[in-house]
Image (spheres, rainbow, N blue to C red):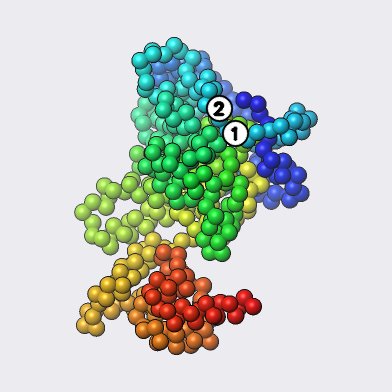
Amino acid sequence: MSRFPTKAHEKRKAGSESLAPHLKPSTISKETKVDSLEEIFINVFCPGLLKEGASSMNSEKATIDLTAEHAASPFSSSLVSELDFEEFDQVNYVDVDGYLEYDYEFDDRSKYESSDDDDDDDYSPKRMEAETKVHFLKSKTARCMLSIYVTKEEDNNWLDNIRVECFYKGDLIGHAFGRYIHRQGIKYNFLNIIKLSSHEMGEIAGEIFNKFGCLLHKFKEHVIQRGTGAWGAEMDVGPLLLLEQIRITDRWFRRKGLGRAMVKALIQKSQVQADPFRRLHVIAKPGWFLDDIAEETHGKSKREKRAMNCRALDSAIAFYCYLGFRRIGSSSCFGFSVDPKHKAHSINVDADYDLPRADEELEISDDENIVATSSFSPGNEVMQKRLVKLKQRLSLEHAINTLSDAELVAFFKTFDSKNGSGWKEINSHHNNVLHQAGCALKVYATKWLIKILIRSKN
């Protein structure tokens, strides 16, 4: 495959914007070969680490060390400062006009298949040789071994499965799994192909991409649902890495940088898979990791389960945010671009778009159902408390669901004179007041809102 830059890359290179100093890639030490002592360590303490067909002679080994740069916390800085970026050289690539955008040739399988002769009757996924890395635990002398595998499914030439396994003294203590998608090869029917291949991939694809693999328009242009507005047309091209699972099974090894090291290994391996002049986009959905606390929530009350799920979700979101991930629009997905000049890298963690709190959303949803079904009565104290809570948080929604059409118009007139900025209120389903009034069939109130909207625009 010829390696030419995309037009988007030309535009980035021609741009005059300067990157903030704290976002520039730091000086990264080159990968060093593990010496013979480390090779002995692998053979003695991790005999199962080097799988069949992946000898210590041809397995790439490098040292990952979280030192002073991450002394405060293993998640204290973005991964963008630790990744290597290849720049475009116009001297070597002059025939830019003849470039055709594509990520993957379906006839070119040599880079994905093992060099060993395969049996014609063997249709199992092909596993490439293991790449082994050494990770030094933060402030510890102990070392963990990271083993990286890439498997290729026969039926899906556009998909690579990348798995990272973490070993300590021969015991598996953690693993991470991601799917590398050669998007350009399946853009003609992206959404359907993704959904047929995997439920998890289809869940992400259906939330943020259209049927051709482009970011949904609402996450680019909608005044509310675009969120911070950091993600745009650049998400329409280039390969994708979907992070499906990151788990540290041994609690003693948590918060020691292993999760960060495994995510970094997945991204680095994906960069090797990708064309150097196609920008890789990494996508994660923190809500997937709530399965890790299923055993802990067993036998708990609904309120306790809700609190535990909220804490777990907050921890997962914080983990990704401190790695440099930022929310894609108003979706539940977070994205990471290997482009150091991407707008998402200029957004502070505190400034990132945040959805309604998980606990509030659950409680408000309960209140909405109560109001919608008219299942409350003045004598029901529980229902009244929930309605009071709904009125405090979402006064407009409370009025829409409890007042008549004529009373609602009067309420809107009073509300407009007292609190003009409160019209931006949205509920847990991201619907503004106009959507809510329309869905509640409040005809006169909806007409009044439209009239006010037209007047404000004029």
What is the three-letter code of the residue carrying label 1?
Tyr
Q: What crowding class fits label 1: few (fewer than 14 Cα within 10 Å), some (14-19), or many (20 or more)?
A: some
Asked whether, in this view, residue 29 is left or right of residue 413, the answer is right
Q: Disc 1 versus disc 2: distance between alpha carbons?
A: 8 Å
Q: Residue furthest right?
A: 91
Q: What residue is shown with label 2?
A: 105
What is the three-letter code of the residue carrying label 2?
Glu
Q: Is there CB contact under 8 Å for labels 1 and 2?
A: yes
> Can you give x and y, in whole percent of width and height, for residue 382 in the image?
25, 75
* Residue 124, quarter of the rendered image: top left
> Can you give x and y, in whole percent of width and height, for residue 211 in the image?
48, 46
Q: Is residue 64 visible?
A: no
Quadrant housing the N terminus: top right
Q: Nearer the viewer, residue 356 or 403?
A: 403
- Count of labels in the image: 2
Secondary element at image label 1: loop
x 41%, y 28%: residue? 155
Quadrant housing the C terminus: bottom right
* Residue 300, quarter of the rendered image: bottom left
Q: Nearer the viewer, residue 257 or 215?
A: 215
Vertical order, 108 against 399 (above or below): above
Vertical order, 234 against 49 (above or below): below
Secondary element at image label 2: loop
x 38%, y 47%: residue? 288
Q: Nearer the viewer, residue 58 or 43?
A: 58
> Can you give x and y, in whole percent of width and height, for residue 380 in the image?
22, 79
> Can you give x and y, in whole percent of width and height, for residue 257 in the image?
47, 41
Asked whether, in this view, residue 401 is left or right of residue 85, the answer is left
Q: What residue is shown with label 1?
A: 102
